Amino acid sequence: MDQDSLQQFRAEVIARKNLPTIPPVLAGIVALIDSDTAGARRLVELIERDQSLTAKLLRLANSAFFGQSRRVSTVPRAILLLGFSTVRNLALGVKVWEALAGDVTRKRLEELWAHAVTVAVCAKALAGRLRACDPDEAFTAGLLHDVGRLVIAVRFRDMYWDTVGGAAESEPIEQLERATFGVDHAEVGGWLLEAWALPPIIVEAVRQHHEAQPRAGLPHVLAVTNRLVAWTDIAAGTARPEAEPYLEPLAETGLTVEAWLRMVGELRDAGTLGAIPIE
């Protein structure tokens, strides 16, 4: 796209032209972002009004990631066991994906979702270990970091998938996008989430997740996690050679290749990676 076409595309995303408008349930959840547990009753009302969201949320609550010994069968029970912010952020992530997924094939959607969940789980764990940002916010940013791919795919359809080689995360996907479309999915995702009035820190983290020097805190945690996930064979417990020099500046934080692989191995062995289905 030339500069004029790019500005038109940005305007279309911000105005949500040819894209879904923010669903009422999602708008209600966003309105609770600055709330505390006093908003739990309202959150229950919003979720229970949406049967699809209720079913997905309960499935998530019963997944291996949350390690509940007792089955979670109601939304209030999920809030009691998992906490208000965790349930709210899960609902937020699910509804954003649900709103954008209509024109994406199931296979591609499942591949994108599996990567998003892996990044979300690892970002939450890494945020907790580094004490660099709120783990719940890291999880939400991880779930949402690639929604820009859905937006570009809605706009360009098969041309997008032909350009990036399919739904799997490949390196350097952002360079392929910029060369062909004049913009990458991180920037486009930031446009949409900002237009939907999601928290600025989530928008910033999504927008910066492919930058070489993202801002400290959540943007940095998400960028590091996304890069490391792309370089890690989780099943084999190995990382590509690029990981070691990339992590050298972070050695003083305790984040080394060995520490990363140990953390990922613990998550894998606990069944928490790939344990959250999209449907």
Image (tube, grey):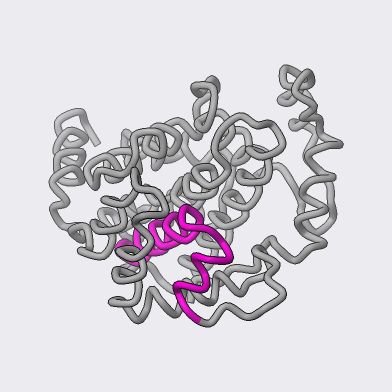
**Percent x, y for residue 117?**
57, 57
Seen at 38% across and 57% down, the residue is: 92
Q: Tell me, yes or no, whether the highlighted magenta stretch contains residue 63.
A: no
Q: Which of 55 and 5 is in front in this view?
A: 55
What's the residue at 47%, 37% (across, down)? Answer: 174
- 242 w.r.t. 272: above or below: above
Residue 250 as seen in the image, left or right of residue 119: right
Q: Is residue 201 left or right of residue 139?
A: left
Q: Main secondary structure of the magenta part?
A: helix
Q: Position of residue 211 (x, y in %)?
A: 50, 26
Query: Quadrant of residue 53 in the image?
Result: bottom left
Quarter of the image with the N terminus is top left
Q: Is residue 97 magenta?
A: yes
Work out which residue is located at the far front of the displayed protein and give it.
38
Residue 170 versus residue 237: which sits nearer the camera? Answer: 237
Viewer-proximal residue among 206 and 103: 206
Residue 264 location (% of width, % of height):
77, 49
Q: Where are the magenta residues, as a range?
A: 74-100
Q: Position of 53 compared to 132: left or right?
A: left
**Which residue is located at x 32 percent, y 61 percent?**
100
Numbered-mark total: 0
In the displayed structure, does residue 182 sit left or right of residue 138? left
Residue 242 higher or lower than 161, as above or below: above
Q: Residue at x 56, y 28 (%)?
A: 220
Residue 87 in the image: state x and y as whole percent.
47, 61
Q: Is residue 179 visible?
A: no
